């Protein structure tokens, strides 16, 4: 045993000398997490990261069989689900992990908004988080087309048409996204490249920046807790918080496995560019509020296209979210901007109401 321990120690010293792992672990061990009545919201970031890792692992497994061409994409997904052992489960895990990741990132973003965790010096942490939210939506949009089924084809056609209404650059952006003037095999190949290469690389880089900022500045204490002094001390990140975080990952994994097993992903019919669009075609739930808003707008408002104004309004809302740290001037300890709280609650309510309205609307209207 003594020789074995010496070998382990020598290997550990050799690895640490070349990687500096002990320095990283020392930094993690020094990190403390404040304990108060809102501490539970801190776990959503780790849960979102865990679901992203589930996406990466299941996505890599799917890549072994998937073929990104209009003539073979649908058949390759059908082969995965029907012939590959547990292929249906891997695809279902991938699909449900995407939905759960959007859900947790959404809650994480708005919990940070409501708790005013964007205040300096955490403004860069907030901005990187907003961009990560946009990248998460981009994952959903580009991945939706890859099975090349009927619903995905026409939903992508509608979605890229909306991009085309943006002033000045809309037509160029639409053709760039499609790889031409219409949704074709070139669109599928382009979305595949974005989905499996560009977005993962950008997300990993931004996640690294985001985690670095969280590590550097620590967890934010909400203004209400700062004001009444109700912080109940702190806990060590390693191992106390990390173990609790791991429980959240296990809960997410259990929910993910249950959804994938009992509600497996469906494939539908193969896309046919010459077939009429299905009646009542709708986007994924996380785009429904945008889709239904544009549907409710009149064709023209004050002489301008209603759809264009709707798209510009969503773009401005995204810009507002990005710049919240610089728009909220009450950033002193114990101070909270009621206006920002009202805006955050109004945005959440709007998204929920329009999503429900979109799903309950008559598809023929």
Image (cartoon, rainbow, N blue to C red):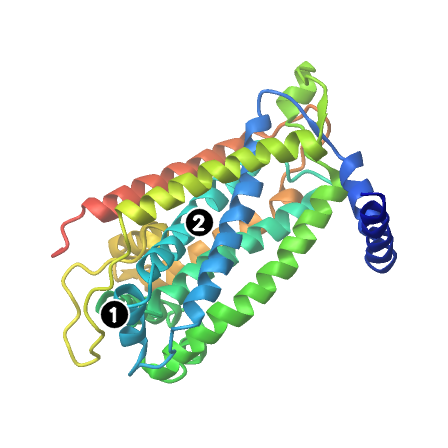
Res. 114 in view: no
Q: Is residue 39 above or below residue 133?
A: above
Q: Earlier in the sequence, mark 1 or mark 2?
A: 2
Which x, y percent locates residue 41?
A: 55, 32
The residue positioned 67% from the left and 37% from the top of the image is: 329
Q: Nearer the viewer, mark 1 or mark 2?
A: 1
Instruction: Tell me residue 203's x, y (percent).
Output: 58, 60
In front of the other: 115 or 231:
231
Q: Is residue 255 left or right of residue 250?
A: left
Q: Nearer the viewer, residue 101 or 287?
A: 101
Q: Considering the image in quadrants, where does the N terminus appear?
A: top right
With 9 as the anchor, is 84 left or right in this view?
Answer: left
Locate residue 208: give its quadrant: bottom right
Residue drawn at the location 37% of the way across and 51% of the way down: 96
Q: Nearer the viewer, residue 186 or 43?
A: 43
Within 10 Å of disc 1 (Cα), the crowding (few <14, some 14-19, many 20+) is: many
Badge 2: residue crowd in 10 Å (few <14, some 14–19, many ≥20): many
In the picture of the structure, the residue carrying the numbered disc 2 is 102
The answer, for residue 352, to whether it is visible in the render is yes
Residue bearing the label numbered 1: 149
Q: Quarter holding the C terminus?
A: bottom left
State the CA–CA distance, disc 1 to disc 2: 22 Å
- Secondary structure of the residue carrying tag 2 is helix
* Front position in the image: 205 or 24: 24
């Amino acid at each position: 045993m003594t020789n074995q321990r010496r070998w382990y120690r020598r290997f550990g010293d050799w690895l640490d000398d070349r990687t500096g792992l002990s320095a990283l672990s020392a930094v993690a061990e020094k990190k403390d997490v404040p304990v108060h009545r809102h501490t539970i919201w801190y776990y959503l970031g780790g849960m979102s990261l865990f679901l992203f890792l589930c996406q990466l692992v299941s996505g890599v497994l799917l890549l072994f069989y998937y073929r990104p061409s209009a003539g073979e994409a649908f058949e390759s997904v059908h082969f995965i689900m029907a012939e590959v052992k547990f292929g249906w489960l891997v695809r279902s895990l991938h699909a449900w992990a995407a939905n759960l990741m959007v859900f947790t990132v959404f809650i994480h973003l708005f919990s940070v908004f409501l708790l005013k965790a964007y205040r300096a010096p955490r403004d860069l942490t907030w901005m990187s988080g907003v961009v990560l939210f946009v990248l998460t939506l981009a994952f959903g949009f580009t991945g939706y087309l890859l099975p090349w089924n009927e619903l995905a084809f026409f939903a992508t056609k509608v979605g890229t048409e909306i991009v085309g209404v943006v002033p000045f650059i809309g037509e160029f952006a639409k053709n760039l996204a499609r790889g031409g003037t219409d949704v074709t095999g070139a669109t599928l190949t382009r979305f595949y490249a974005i989905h499996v290469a560009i977005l993962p690389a950008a997300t990993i880089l931004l996640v690294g920046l985001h985690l670095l900022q969280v590590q550097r500045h620590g967890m934010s204490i909400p203004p209400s807790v700062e004001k009444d002094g109700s912080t109940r001390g702190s806990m060590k990140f390693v191992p106390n918080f990390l173990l609790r975080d791991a429980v959240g990952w296990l809960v997410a994994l259990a929910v993910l496995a249950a959804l994938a097993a009992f509600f497996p992903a469906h494939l539908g019919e193969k896309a046919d560019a010459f077939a009429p669009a299905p009646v009542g075609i709708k986007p994924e739930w996380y785009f429904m509020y945008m889709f239904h808003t544009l549907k409710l707008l009149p064709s023209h408002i004050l002489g301008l296209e209603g759809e264009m104004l709707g798209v510009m309004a969503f773009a401005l809302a995204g810009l507002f979210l990005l710049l919240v740290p610089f728009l909220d001037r009450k950033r002193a300890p114990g101070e909270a901007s009621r206006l920002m709280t009202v805006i955050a609650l109004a945005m959440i309510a709007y998204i929920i109401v329009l999503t429900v309205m979109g799903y309950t609307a008559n598809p023929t209207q």
